[in-house]
Image (spheres, grey):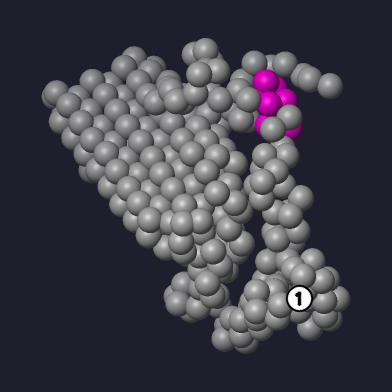
Amino acid sequence: MATQIHPTAVVAQGAELGVDVVIGPYSVVGGSVRVGDRTRIGPHVVLDGVTRLGAENIIVGQANLGGPPQDLSYRGEPTWLEIGDRNTIREFVTINRGTIKGGGITKVGHGCLLMACCHVAHDCELGNGVILANGVLLAGHVLVGDGANIGGAAAANQFVSIGRYAYIGGMTRVSQDAPPFMLLEGHQARVRQVNVVGLERAGFERARIEALQAAFRTIYRSGDPQSQSIERLKSDSSATPEVHELCAMLEQQAHGHKGRYRESLREFFAKLGAERILGERRG
């Protein structure tokens, strides 16, 4: 099927469209936008800024992708938004492009589902297979690992990291890093148990899930200081890679500003953004 552009859509000169792209009624595509093959753009969608969409994405109506960051330091720099392949982005989702101080780029991986009314702020990074349920709000600089599932109306503070295959319950306030493979819920968020259902659905072997459950009991139920529990798990020669990953993120969290490791990387992100966007090298 050839590329189809509805007569009411506006595609600016300079925009790049792949093969078999469909652009629906009243949508607007900016001149610095690139849309990958077989991507479907619904009605009233706005694609703005330096935005790159991969192949086979489905963008349902009224989404706004690549808009300027909601940050008072932004001065119109040509920062980026990159979205991978096979993502579904539903009604009224907003994804802002990056800022210089945050590295200059907002990223969404492959195979993600962003349900209606989600907001992904500037400089966020979403891995592959991430699910954001309706109304999820991610503040700036948030990192979401592969396979993470965030429930409806949950909100993450700026610079929070959410680990791989974590499950965040609906309406949860995430103000500190959320460890991988765990289920968190509450206001503030608290680790409740291992995300067993999510790991089973993702194809994790039963033995690896049981190892994480044992690590959960050691860290969260033994009553020992967390640092001692982590050292004990790290020194266990039978510990699985997932247990080591859990321990590593908890150690990062402990050294991060207010429990957010990415807060300690502000200077690195600012240097990276200046090099990427402005071509400046900062010593």
Mark count: 1
The local crowd at label 1, few if under 14, some if 14 to 19, many if 20 or more residues have their Cα within 10 Å, is few
What amino acid is at disc 1?
Answer: Asp
**Quadrant position of the N terminus in the picture:** top left
Q: x%, y% of residue 43?
A: 18, 35
- Asked whether residue 52 appears in the rendered view, the answer is no
Q: x%, y% of residue 125?
A: 54, 43
Q: Quadrant of residue 248?
A: bottom right
In this view, the residue in front, 105 or 86, is 105
Residue 272 drawn in magenta: yes
Q: Which range is magenta?
A: 268-276
Residue at image coords 54%, 75%: 193
Residue at image coords 79%, 83%: 238
Left or right of residue 98: residue 225: right
Residue 235 higher or lower than 111, as above or below: below
Q: x%, y% of residue 128?
A: 50, 55
In this view, the residue in front, 272 or 235, is 235
Residue 223 higher or lower than 159, as above or below: below
**Quadrant position of the C terminus in the picture:** top right
In this view, the residue in front, 217 or 200, is 217
Residue 101 higher or lower than 151, as above or below: above
Left or right of residue 134: residue 263: right
Residue 99 drawn in magenta: no
Q: x%, y% of residue 74?
A: 52, 18
- Asked whether residue 139 appears in the rendered view, the answer is yes
Q: Taken as a whole, is the magenta stretch helix, strand or loop?
A: helix
Residue at image coords 64%, 16%: 278
Secondary element type, mark 1:
loop
Residue at the disc numbered 1: 224
